[in-house]
Amino acid sequence: MKKIALFVLVACLACACGQKPADPIAEAIVAEMMKDIDQPYEIHVTELQKLDSTSFATEFQRRIGIYDIRLDQNTARMEKYIREGKTNNATRVFEALQRDTKIFNELNAMKEMMGADTLKTAYYDYSYTYSGKVGKQRIAPKKAFATVTPEGKVITFAAERKELHKATGLAIPGYKELLDSFKETEEE
């Protein structure tokens, strides 16, 4: 009897030692993926791999570059509409120019305020495979990508890596609030 009890104890310990502790990044990815799902789910992330990191300086450069291009394009469009006598279109583009100019200037100011902290990592790119079950539907293994801050906050998901950085400006402290301030103004 003692041999059986000892064998069971050893087997239980071996099973417990064989289980890997849950990866906090994988847990954060699953939690963010399933945050709006109102069905029971059992999703597992496998093959989690860190691909790259991006500094705040690089992210500022990316965001400021986007607004710089938008300013050039909208200026050209506004001038074209004025030449063509399309005042309503010119007014609409002028308003967009004002908004984009303010965001461009605010991003530059935010970058200056961060100083040397712009050299810190803003987020990491990960590739992962997930599978499991949502409700009664099985999810076959799928490859995906995510950006995650060093603190473990998931910023974006994408099925294609080239789509991953569309919203990563959200890693910049204050950027979301800046964008939200324009939404509030438009709604008023």
Image: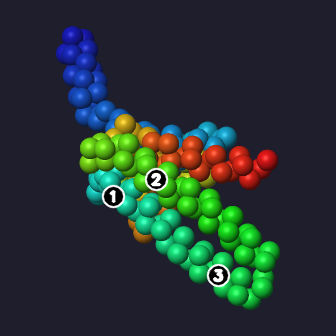
Percent of width and height locating residue 178: 56, 47
Picture quadrant where residue 96 is located: bottom right
Alpha carbons under labels 3 and 1: distance apart = 32 Å
Percent of width and height locating residue 72: 52, 75
Q: List the residue tagged with mark 1.
A: 58
Q: Amino acid at mark 2?
A: Leu
Q: Marks 1 and 2: in contact by CB < 8 Å?
A: no
Q: Marks 2 and 3: in contact by CB < 8 Å?
A: no
Q: List the residue tagged with mark 3.
A: 79
Mark closer to the observer (3, 2): 3
Picture residue at 56% right of the left edge, 77% below the top = 73
Sequence-wise first label, 3 or 1: 1
Sequence-wise first label, 3 or 2: 3
Q: Amino acid at mark 1?
A: Thr
Between 43 and 89, the residue placed more toward the observer is 89
Alpha carbons under labels 2 and 1: distance apart = 13 Å
Percent of width and height locating residue 81: 71, 83
Between 91 and 58, the residue placed more toward the observer is 91
Picture residue at 34% right of the left edge, 50% below the top = 56
Picture residue at 21% right of the left edge, 22% below the top = 10
Label 1 element class? helix
Q: List the residue tagged with mark 2.
A: 107
Between 161 and 139, the residue placed more toward the observer is 161
Sequence-wise first label, 2 or 1: 1
Mark closer to the observer (3, 1): 3
